[in-house]
Image (cartoon, grey):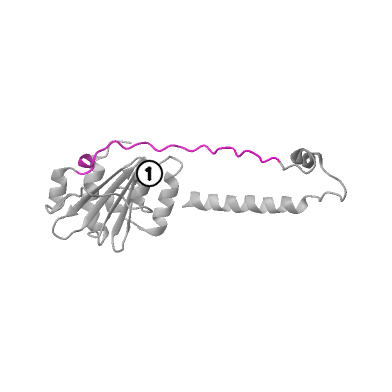
Amino acid sequence: MQQHTARTLAALAIAAAAVTLVGCTSAAKPGTTSSSSAQAGGSQGGPAATPTPTPTATVPPTPVTLTCDQVLTADQVYAYNPNFSKDPGYAPTAGTLEKQVADWQGVTCAWKNQTSGDVVQIAIAMPPSDKLEGLKNTAITVAQPVPTYGTPPQVEGYFKPGTAGQVQVFRGKYWVVAESTAFFEPGDAAPVMQSVLGNLPAS
């Protein structure tokens, strides 16, 4: 959070400096035309040249090659609740954290309770390195820290209650998201998260 605050204060300082510089710029004298304006306009009446934008380099995500059976084994699913089995028709919904995981070449899985209809979604990504800190900053502002998912700072866990309880866990380069209507409180997701984190390779 201190890093986040420092970034915010730095941005405000830069913005204030920019305003000061603009206020100190002298206006062009009437009747004069700068050489740059003449060059930009080309011949009289011609259109001004449009500068070509420079592409911004982005850090790519690291693909997660785990299968859903490796994320949560059949024995672990049975131990959690024998009524759950893989949901073959599952696909992450647009605008969700699970869809963001999929867009970052992560793995997205779901298991459905054949009795209650509850679905447990689990998604794992290795986000671009320049996005990871922002994800953590967002998680801590919208959810409550949960130390029982793992020992900080090696593992940072968060839970957000709602119609479907949402878990976010950060371990090394991994971002784990779990969501289900069966997660009423942080402890409901704890057995699942312990299994998933135990199945993750070292990052």
Number of marks in picture:
1
Say which of 171 and 148 sits in front.
171
Relative height, residue 117 to residue 177 (above, below): below
Secondary structure mostly seen in the magenta stretch: loop
Residue pushed farthest right?
31
Where residue 39 sits in the image (x, y, percent)?
77, 38
On screen, residue 91 versus residue 82, left or right, reads right
The reply to whether residue 150 is visible in this rendering is no
On screen, residue 99 versus residue 9, left or right, reads left
Q: Which residue is mark 1?
A: 103
Circle 1: residue type? Asp
Where residue 34 sits in the image (x, y, percent)?
82, 42
Residue pushed farthest front?
45
On screen, residue 139 versus residue 54, left or right, reads left
In what quadrant of the picture does the C terminus appear?
top left
Residue that appears at 26% across and 44% down: 197
Is residue 61 magenta-colored? Answer: yes
Residue that appears at 38% across and 44% down: 103
Where residue 141 sits in the image (x, y, percent)?
42, 58
The reply to whether residue 26 is visible in this rendering is yes
On screen, residue 20 versus residue 94, left or right, reads right
Residue that appears at 26% across and 51% down: 121
Count residues near mark 1 (Cα–Cα under 10 Å), then give few for <14, some for 14-19, many for 20+.
few
Instruction: Classify mark 1: helix, strand or loop.
Output: helix
Is residue 115 magenta-colored? Answer: no
Residue that appears at 34% across and 44% down: 102
Q: Quadrant of residue 65?
A: top left
Where residue 167 sits in the image (x, y, percent)?
30, 54
Magenta residue span: 49-72
Relative height, residue 143 to residue 21 (above, below): below
Relative height, residue 181 to residue 75 (above, below): below
Say which of 19 and 42 sits in front.
42
